[in-house]
Image: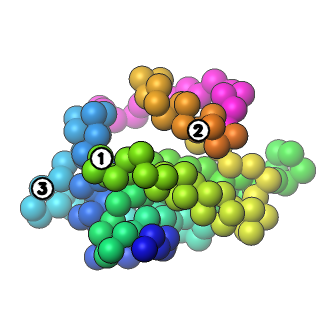
Amino acid sequence: MMEFRHAAKEDLASIVRLLADDTLGASRERYEEPLPQAYAQAFSAIQNQQGNFILLAVEDAEVVGCLQLTLIPGLARLGMTRAQIEGVRISNAHRGKGIGEALFRHAIAYAREQGCGLVQLTTDKSRGDAHRFYQRLGFADSHVGMKLMLVDD
């Protein structure tokens, strides 16, 4: 039975495990005991910011997927609120089962309920499978994303 819910502090290790269990994440994340304090600090900041949370896909009490959803009020487009999706991961053992699609549909429905006019995301250029997945869900690569790293990656 699949359940979707907001993450709690107790889920943090499971989330970091998912983030690290990935080709790109393996070099960016540190899943270890104890977890680096930076994760707890970031999770606390997310929880304290209205309209910002980690959405989990949970199956049989196991966290099998996650994404971060942030609602961003704006002035552009007549004051449109956007939903930003980041940090998407589905457990390697659970890919291809429709969990990612169900998680996205849940996030999109939530964004719509909150009055968002669009949902946006960024994805690494090397993730061809992810690009096809997002396009299949209706996302269009309509803009060019750019980043300026302020810390070593």
Q: Residue at x 25, y 46 (%)?
A: 20
Amino acid type, mark 3:
Glu
Question: Could you say which is closer to the camera, residue 74 or residue 141?
Answer: 141
Q: Which of label 1 and label 3 is nearer to you?
A: 1
Q: Which residues are magenta?
A: 139-153
The residue singled out by tag 1 in the image is: 92
Image disc number at residue 51: none
The disc, 1 or 2, on the residue closer to the chain's N-terminal end is 1
Residue 4 is at least partly visible in this image: yes
Amino acid identity at mark 1: Asn
Question: Which is more toward the observer, 134 or 40?
Answer: 134
Residue 33, magenta (yes or no):
no
- Which residue in the protein does label 3 denote? 32
Q: Quadrant of residue 15?
A: bottom left
Query: Measured from the top left, where is residue 5 in percent x and y?
Result: 48, 73
Question: What number is the disc on residue 134?
Answer: 2
Scheme by which the image is coloured: rainbow
- Asked if residue 131 lies left or right of residue 60, the reply is right
- Give the CA distance from mark 1 to mark 2: 18 Å
**Residue 33, x across and y down, in percent:** 9, 61
Question: Is residue 144 located in the magenta-colored stretch of the structure?
Answer: yes
